């Protein structure tokens, strides 16, 4: 790791001014992705701005029909939150399947979605629930947030402050985890709302994406059988030592069925 200067501002304004106009300064959340990258010298920055002392970025609250999760909220807090369990239990379950206890205690909502790892779990919930990413400058709809491999709509100097999740009628997440890291070889988040059905897929492609053919079929009948005959084409999907594109394509359909079944069971409770 190369040397850097470390800052721990107590306010969002202070953090924003520390990174403003500087491309050699990086925000630090739990450090779960950033610190290994620095240690391996895959990246180097002159300054790191730790967001850990900014209380406004922490916590979980319900606002009407929306669940708001602060950017610096660690995954373990989402797992343990009674508010999340009441509003969107699928989100608590998803967070509980991330990595291991250390990762869940250090890793954050904001860090996960800013990083936009193609195999990360939260992006599937953000896209599947049509959430809104709130930054210190604007609000970004999930459909406009994830742009590609490790690429988001965030502009230089922009800080995620929270994510607003609309509360669905029913939702579920199913993933096939890579056994060592628990990242998703493929993961599918299904959400049923008054406005329709959304199906978001992570792990399978270079970035999280919507499975629109499944959405259309499930909007007619929210039942695993509605997915009969629907396939995902492997073209453009990820292929690596863990799974081929063809395998991931077939996983997506299986996981989508399972998620619908799970969401139906959860909705019936
Ligand atoms: C061993 C291991 C296993 C893992 N397994 C899984 C898994 O199964 N599923 C899964 O989804 N994830 C997994 N992760 C990822 C983990 O959950 C973290 O969410 C992810 O690494 C980001 O970490 P962080 O929140 O500590 O952010 P950091 O590493 O501190 O930052 C990541 C990036 O986000 C930027 N950033 C951070 N906060 C903000 C903000 N508020 N606004 C704008 N930019 C910001 C940083 O500048 C940096 O570029 C794993 C990680 C590890 C190390």
Image: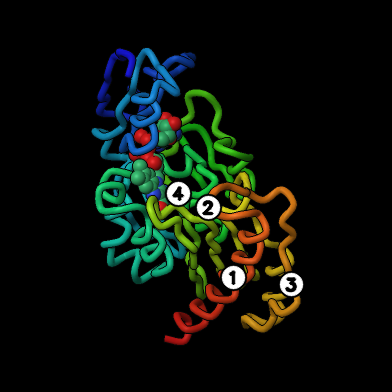
83 versus 100 height, above or below: below
Q: Earlier in the sequence, mark 2 or mark 4?
A: 4
Mark 4 Cβ and ligand 1 under 8 Å apart: no
**Neighbour tally class for label 3: few under 14, some 14-19, many 20 plus, Cα within 10 Å:** few
Residue 230, which numbered label? 3
Circle 4 — which element?
strand
**Quarter of the rendering containing residue 87:** bottom left
Colouring convention used in this rendered image of the protein: rainbow
**Neighbour tally class for label 1: few under 14, some 14-19, many 20 plus, Cα within 10 Å:** many
Q: Earlier in the sequence, mark 3 or mark 1?
A: 3
Q: Earlier in the sequence, mark 3 or mark 4?
A: 4
Circle 2 — which element?
loop
Q: Earlier in the sequence, mark 2 or mark 3?
A: 3
Residue 163, which numbered label? 4
The nearer-to-camera label among 1 and 4 is 1
Q: Find residue 222 and report its horizontal and vertical position in percent.
A: 63, 80
- Give the residue drawn at x 41%, y 62%: 94
* Ligand 1, image quadrant it occupies: top left
């Amino acid at each position: 790791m190369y040397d850097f200067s470390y800052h721990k501002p107590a306010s969002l304004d202070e953090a924003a001014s520390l990174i403003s106009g500087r491309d050699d300064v990086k925000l630090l959340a739990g450090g779960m992705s950033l610190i290994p990258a620095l240690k391996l010298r895959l990246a180097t920055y002159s300054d790191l701005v730790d967001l850990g002392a900014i209380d406004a970025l922490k916590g979980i609250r319900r606002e009407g029909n929306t669940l708001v999760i602060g950017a610096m909220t660690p995954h373990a807090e989402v797992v343990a939150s009674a508010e999340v369990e009441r509003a969107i239990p699928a989100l608590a379950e998803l967070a509980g399947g991330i990595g291991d206890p250390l990762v869940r205690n250090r890793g954050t909502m904001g860090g996960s979605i800013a990083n936009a790892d193609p195999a990360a779990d939260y992006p599937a919930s953000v896209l599947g629930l049509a959430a809104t990413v709130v930054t210190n400058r604007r609000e970004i709809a999930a459909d406009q947030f994830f742009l590609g491999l490790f690429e988001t709509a965030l502009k230089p100097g922009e800080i995620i402050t929270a994510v607003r999740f609309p509360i669905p009628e029913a939702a579920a997440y199913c993933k096939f985890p890579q056994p060592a890291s628990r990242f998703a070889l493929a993961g599918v988040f299904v959400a049923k709302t008054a406005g329709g059905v959304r199906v978001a897929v992570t792990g399978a492609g270079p970035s999280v994406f919507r499975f629109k053919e499944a959405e259309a079929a499930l909007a007619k009948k929210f039942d695993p059988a509605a997915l009969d005959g629907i396939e995902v084409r492997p073209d453009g999907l990820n292929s690596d030592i863990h799974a081929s594109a063809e395998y991931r394509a077939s996983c997506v359909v299986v996981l989508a069925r399972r998620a619908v079944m799970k969401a139906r069971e959860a909705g019936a409770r």
